[in-house]
Image: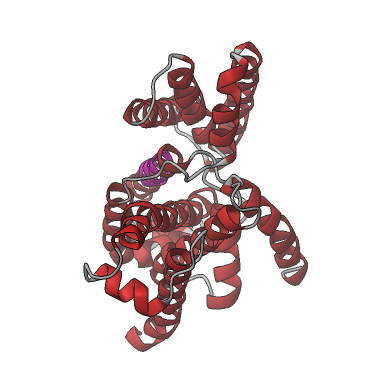
Amino acid sequence: MLARLGLPLSLLLLAALAALLLALGVGSAKISPAQIWDLLQGEGDALARTMVMELRLPRALSAFAVGGLLAVAGALMQVLLRNPLADPYVLGLSGGASIGALAAMLGGLGGLAISSSAFSGALFSTFLVFGLAHGSGGWTPSRLLLTGVVVAAGWGAVITLMLALSPAERLPGMLYWLMGDLSYARTPWPPLLLLLATCVVLIPLGRSLNVLARGPQQAAALGVAVRPLEWCIYVTASLLTAAAVTTAGSIGFVGLVVPHMLRLLLGNDQRLILPACALAGGTLLVLADTLARTMIAPEQLPVGVITALLGVPTFLFLLYRSR
C-alpha cells in the first residue's frame, strides 16, 4: 500500500519543488539554481536576496497553498455531492467572499481588513447555503447543490451592482481581485499550515470517503457514520475555499480540473487522491502564476485568467477521454 502511494506522491513532490524553483528563478532578473541555494542560506547579493526572499518566495508559496487548498476542496466537494463536475465555488462561497472583499475596498480599507472581510463573507455564505438547504428537514446533495447555485447567482447580481456603483479609481483593483491575483499575497504560512493540517486529518478518513463516494446507503451498511462525515466534508471544504479566496481572490478551474485529472490517472482512492491534489493543485497554480507575471512583463496578468485559459481546453479534453 505504501509503495503504491509513494511513487506518484514522490513524482508530484519533485514536480512541486521544480515549479517552486522555476518561480524563484524567473522574472525581471533571472537567478540560477546555484544562486537561489546561496540566497536561501543567507549568502549572495543583498538586492537579489531581498527580491527572492521577500517578493518571489512568499508569492510562490502562497500560490502553492491556494492551489492545494482549491484542489483538495474540489476533491471533497465531488465526494460530498457525488458529482465529478462539482468544484469549490459551486456553493456560492466565492460570491460571499467577493462581496466581503469588495465592500472593504469600497470603504477604503486594505491588507488585513480585505482578507478578514473576504473570509467573513465566505463563512456567511456557507451558513446561508447550508441553512437554506437544510430547511425544516435534512439536506441532500442535490438540494445543497441547487441552493448553492441559486445563492451564487444572487451574489453575482450583488457584485455586478457594487461594480456599477463603484468609483472609477477603485475598479481596477476590484476587478483584479475578482479574477484572482497573487500580487499582494505576502503571508503564505497560514494557508500552508491549513493545507498540511487538512491532509494529515483527512488521510486516515480515506477509507470512509471511498465508501461514501459509492453512496450513503452502502456507506451506512458498512458502518460509516454518514451524516457526521458529510458535515465534516462540507465544513472542511468550505473552510479551505474561504482561506484560498481570502488569500488570492477567485481562481477558477483548479478545484475542478485537478481532482478530475488525478482520478483518471490514479484511480479513485481518496487516501491517494487528497495528498496528490494538494501537490498537483499547488504545482499548477505556481506555474500559472509564474506565467502570469512573466508573459507580458513588466505588466502582470491576473492568475485567474491563466487558469481559465489552461483549464477550459484541459477539462474539455478530459471529458472527451472519459466518454
| Residue 102, above or below 281 | above
Q: Can you name the residue that lies furthest to the bottom here?
A: 3
Q: Is residue 143 visible?
A: no
Count of numbered badges drawn on the protein: 0
Q: Position of residue 188 (x, y in %)?
A: 33, 50
Q: In the rendered image of this protein, does residue 139 appear above or below residue 2? A: above
Residue 20 percent across, percent down from the top left? 42, 67
* Residue 67 magenta: no
Chain part drawn in magenta: 235-243
Q: Main secondary structure of the magenta part?
A: helix
Q: Residue at x 57, y 49 (%)?
A: 303
Task: Determine whether 48 is above or below 95 in the image.
Answer: below
Quadrant of residue 295 within the rendered picture:
bottom right
Counting from the top left corner in percent of width and height, residue 208 is at 37, 62
Toward the top, the furthest residue is 165
Question: Which residue is at a point 57% across and 38% down the rendered structure image?
Answer: 145
Determine if the magenta segment contains residue 242: yes
Camera-side residue of 221 and 37 = 37
Q: State the colouring used for the structure image.
A: secondary structure
Q: From this viewpoint, is residue 239 visible?
A: yes
Q: Quadrant of the C terminus?
A: bottom right
Q: Residue at 48% x, 63% y: name it.
A: 29
> Residue 303 or 22: which is nearer the viewer?
22
Task: Decide if residue 271 is on the left or right side of residue 260.
Answer: left
Residue 120 percent location from the top left of the image: 37, 26
Quarter containing the N terminus: bottom left
Q: 94 above or below 168?
A: below
